[in-house]
Every structure is written in structure tokens, then in C-alpha cells.
Image (spheres, rainbow, N blue to C red):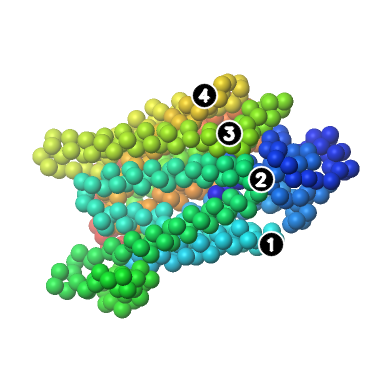
């Protein structure tokens, strides 16, 4: 869960801080100059008041930790980067060790380090705990696709991918939504992390009571499949990975093959083009989070909207509504496309049919991001920004399901590997945009910066056009190489 730490640079505030004591009061309006923002959670310091509980010295440093607000917030960008990189690390383990133990132990690790974040006594510990929690939290969002592939038939997967995508696309908005509500009421930054600790604890409990190993080696006949008792103790042996260790090594993918498959997949041109398209289209979701948190939280006297934390929390419902509308539409439309294609082609299915919703996604995402930029730059009514944000969320959701379904249909034997690369494409863009989104908007104007972003989203459709036209031949040309890689 990201947050922002903001610092005043106005002369009046500086003079006040030199002669006054800091007190904790319930002021939540931020100041216009922002050190760094990530994820849309505002933790503000205006004048003599510090709503976060971190007392500041007269030089603008956090006296509790001895660092500037900018440095205090640096872990957030590292977290986004690690969420992408370590998805690539955990996924092969799900192939050579099993789905359940990777999910279980990463959730346990995530709980420990998220708890450590809330209890951090100093900056160094806080930085380490934030980074390590991201290392473990990313496993569930990548390994999840492997569970869906194992549990559901071909004709069921598109809908299940839609439900899964709806959850993870909403997550960048749900975090700031709830975090702003919490901080807006308690005025303590630690409480946002205590909430996160509780959420991860619930995840661990759900894994213990409901998860089982879903991997079955389909090349092994039923008579030779290892027995799987349904008792709680036996299931926990599979969840913790002890059962997997006791099986014949040939039942699971080898260590070398698991990592080899990961490399082979990204080298396939049609999948590489899909990842490039996803990178170019999804990265601005983080950018909008950053900008709206700043502009709508900035006081009206400085050209903002003067929203407090509670109002900002409500604002984050806009993209969530868009994502849910896209899920309802795609829930039926994706299956309709597949059935129509199979019917018209005498029972033959081509994965490229999954890509059609991406063009519909562009119809919503491109004008949506333009509308957000125009609303912010010209200080239009908040509904203009909310509708534009929702349209962009709708487009991102439609495109995400289409790209994921196409990739899984193209590589049905490597679902976790596919999810890892798509997750990396998504998060690398979010990591990068956190450094330039706000300075870019200030320099050129938000109408210009968001207009260029809309142009980049338009460009992201070009790789899909190539895959749509030549994907069949590219898959045939690389199928033998892919099989050898696995």
C-alpha cells in the first residue's frame, strides 16, 4: 500500500516552524510542493500540524527517523519494482515444488514482514521491512493463474481470469481507498500498515483452511498418480510442501526446466509483443493515482480541490466502478467471442480471437485518460475526472483479461510463467512512472502530459495488431522451440 509524504516549502510555514512547537491535530489538507507520492494515500504535514505522528524538526526532517520526507517515502518505488522482479523468481518454484507450498510460505513471509513494517522503530528497519514484504506478497498474484489453469476447463477460464483480474486491477485503488479512510480518522501512518497486516493474516488463514495442491501431472496414468488423502493433516503436508518433496522427482518439472521455460516463453515474439503492449497501456494507472492524490488533496488556495483523506478515499471508487463494469461485460462477451469463432470454423479455436476486446478497451481508456488530464489542468468539476478515471479503469480491465486469456491459451502448459512476465510488464511501468509523472505534469501542464499518455496507450494497440494478424504463424514457427524449452 503506497502513500505520500508531503512537505511545505512556503516561507510562512518555514518561519512558523522555527518558532513553534509541533502539535498533533486533525488537519489533513496537504501543501502544494510534494516530495514523492505513490499509490494515492496522503499523509500530510501542513504548518504546525503533523497528522501522521512523525514530528518534524525546523529543517523539515523527520526528527523520529532523522531523514527528509522524500527519503522516508523512497521505499514505495522500490516496492513496486520488487513486486515485478520477484514474481519471476517465485513462479518457477511453483512448477518444480508445487503451487500450494509456494503460496503458503510466501504468505507467511509476507505476514511477518508486513507486521515488521507496522512495528518499525527506525527508518532502516522500515525500509527493509517494506522491501521484504513486497518480495513475498507478489507470489500470490502470479501463482494464482496457475491455480486457475489447473482447476478449470478451457471453456471456463476466460470468466475465471476475469474475476481474478478484477481483483488485482482493483487492488491499486482499494489500498489507497481504505488507507485514506484509516489515516483520515486516526491520523497515524502506522494504522495503515496495521490494516495491511490484518489483511495478510486473513490470507494466511484462508490458505490454511481452503488451499490444496492443484498440480497433477497429466502424463501419469490414474493408476500411478500418488495418493492424496483428504484429511486435514495430509492436506497440510501438501500445503507446506513436505508431500511434494517425498514424490518422484519426475512427477514435477525439474529445477532447470522450470527456469528454462521462463526464458523460452518471453523469447517468443507474439508473447513479447503482448508484454510490450501491456507495459505501455497499464503503467499510467499508477500515474493517475499519483496525480489525483496530489491535485485533489492540494488546498483550493493553491489551485487544488482541497479534499481531505476521507474525500480522497471516496474518489478512489471511480476506477473500481469502471473495473467492475468491465468485468460484468467481459464475463459474457469473451465467452461469446470464443463460441462464435468455434462455431464458424468447424470446431477450430485460435487464441487470437481473444484479442478483439482490446480494441473496445482503447475506445474507453484513451478518451478517459485525456478527460482526466483536461479536468485536472482546467480545474473542471470532480465528476469529469471521476468519469475519465473510471473509463480508463474499464479499458485497462478489458485489455488485461484479453491479454491474459490470449497468453494462457498460447502457453497452456506454463500459466504461472505467463503470469510472471505479465506482472513484470505491469509493475515495471508503475515503478518508472512514479519518478516522472508529477514533474512532467507541472512542467508541461497536465492536459499535455496526459494527452501524450493517451497517445502512448494508442501506440500500445499496434503490437496487438501485429499479433492479431501474424500470431498464428508466429505460434506455429516457435511451437517446436517452445516444446524443447519445456
CA separation, marks 1 and 2? 18 Å
Residue 383's label in the rendered image is 4
Foreground mark, 4 or 2? 2
Per the image, label 1 sits on a secondary structure element best described as loop
Q: Which residue is mark 3?
A: 311
CA separation, marks 3 and 4? 13 Å
Q: Which residue is mark 2?
A: 187
How packed mark 3 is, by other alpha carbons closer than 10 Å (few <14, some 14-19, many 20 or more), is some
Answer left or right for 62 relative to 183.
right
How packed mark 4 is, by other alpha carbons closer than 10 Å (few <14, some 14-19, many 20 or more), is few
Which residue is found at the position 43% from the left and 58% from the top?
203
First in residue order: circle 3 vs circle 1:
1
CA separation, marks 3 and 1? 30 Å
CA separation, marks 1 and 4? 41 Å
Confirm or deny contact between disc 3 and disc 4 (CB under 8 A).
no
Which of the 4 quarters of the picture holds residue 460?
A: top left
Which of the 4 quarters of the picture holds residue 116?
A: bottom right
Answer left or right for 111 relative to 231.
right
Foreground mark, 1 or 2? 2
Which residue is found at the position 81% from the left and 49% from the top?
57
Amino acid at each position: 500500500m503506497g502513500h505520500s509524504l508531503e512537505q511545505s516549502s512556503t516561507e510562512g510555514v518555514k518561519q512558523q516552524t522555527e518558532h513553534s512547537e509541533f502539535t498533533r491535530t486533525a488537519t489533513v489538507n496537504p501543501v502544494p510542493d510534494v516530495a514523492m507520492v505513490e499509490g494515492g494515500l496522503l499523509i500530510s504535514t501542513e504548518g504546525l500540524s503533523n497528522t501522521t505522528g512523525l514530528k518534524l524538526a525546523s529543517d523539515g526532517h523527520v526528527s523520529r527517523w532523522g531523514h527528509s520526507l522524500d527519503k522516508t517515502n523512497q521505499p514505495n518505488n522500490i516496492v513496486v519494482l520488487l513486486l515485478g522482479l520477484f514474481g519471476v523468481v517465485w513462479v518457477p518454484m511453483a512448477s518444480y515444488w508445487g503451487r500450494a507450498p509456494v503460496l503458503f510460505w510466501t504468505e507467511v513471509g509476507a505476514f511477518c514482514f508486513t507486521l515488521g513494517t507496522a512495528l518499525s522503530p527506525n527508518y532502516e528497519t522500515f525500509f527493509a521491512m517494506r522491501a521484504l514484504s513486497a518480495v513475498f506478497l507478489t507470489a500470490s498474484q502470479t501463482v494464482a493463474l496457475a491455480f486457475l489453469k489447473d482447476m478449470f476447463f478451457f471453456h471456463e477460464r476466460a470468466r475465471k481470469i476475469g474475476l481474478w483480474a478484477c481483483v488485482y486491477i482493483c487492488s491499486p485503488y482499494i489500498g489507497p481507498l481504505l488507507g485514506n479512510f484509516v489515516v483520515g480518522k486516526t491520523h497515524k501512518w502506522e494504522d495503515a500498515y496495521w490494516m495491511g497486516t490484518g489483511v495478510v493474516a486473513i490470507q494466511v488463514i484462508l490458505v490454511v483452511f481452503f488451499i490444496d495442491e492443484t498440480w497433477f501431472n497429466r502424463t501419469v496414468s490414474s493408476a500411478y498418480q500418488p495418493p492424496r488423502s483428504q484429511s486435514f493433516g495430509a492436506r497440510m503436508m501438501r500445503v507446506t510442501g513436505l508431500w511434494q518433496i517425498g514424490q518422484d522427482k519426475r512427477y514435477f518439472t525439474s529445477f532447470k526446466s522450470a527456469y528454462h521455460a521462463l526464458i523460452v516463453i518471453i523469447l517468443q515474439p507474439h508473447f513479447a509483443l503482448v508484454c510490450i503492449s501491456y507495459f505501455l497501456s497499464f503503467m499510467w494507472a499508477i500515474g493517475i493515482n499519483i496525480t489525483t492524490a496530489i491535485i485533489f488533496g492540494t488546498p483550493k488556495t493553491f489551485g487544488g480541490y482541497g479534499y481531505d483523506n476521507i474525500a480522497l478515499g471516496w474518489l478512489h471508487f471511480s476506477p473500481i466502478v469502471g473495473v467492475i463494469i468491465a468485468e460484468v461485460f467481459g464475463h459474457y462477451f469473451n465467452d461469446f467471442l470464443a463460441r462464435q469463432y468455434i462455431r464458424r470454423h468447424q470446431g477450430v479455436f485460435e487464441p487470437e480471437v481473444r484479442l478483439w476486446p482490446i480494441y473496445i478497451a482503447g475506445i474507453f481508456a484513451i478518451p478517459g485518460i485525456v478527460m482526466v488530464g483536461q479536468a485536472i489542468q482546467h480545474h473542471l468539476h470532480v465528476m469529469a475526472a471521476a468519469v475519465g478515471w473510471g473509463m480508463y479503469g474499464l479499458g485497462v480491465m478489458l485489455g488485461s483479461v484479453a491479454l491474459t486469456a490470449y497468453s494462457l491459451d498460447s502457453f497452456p502448459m506454463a500459466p504461472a510463467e505467463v503470469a510472471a512476465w505479465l506482472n513484470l510488464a505491469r509493475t515495471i511501468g508503475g515503478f518508472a512512472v512514479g519518478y516522472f509523472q508529477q514533474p512532467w505534469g507541472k512542467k508541461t501542464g497536465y492536459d499535455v502530459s496526459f494527452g501524450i499518455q493517451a497517445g502512448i496507450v494508442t501506440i500500445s494497440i499496434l503490437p496487438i495488431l501485429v499479433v492479431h494478424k501474424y500470431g498464428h504463424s508466429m505460434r506455429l514457427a516457435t511451437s517446436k522451440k517452445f516444446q524443447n524449452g519445456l
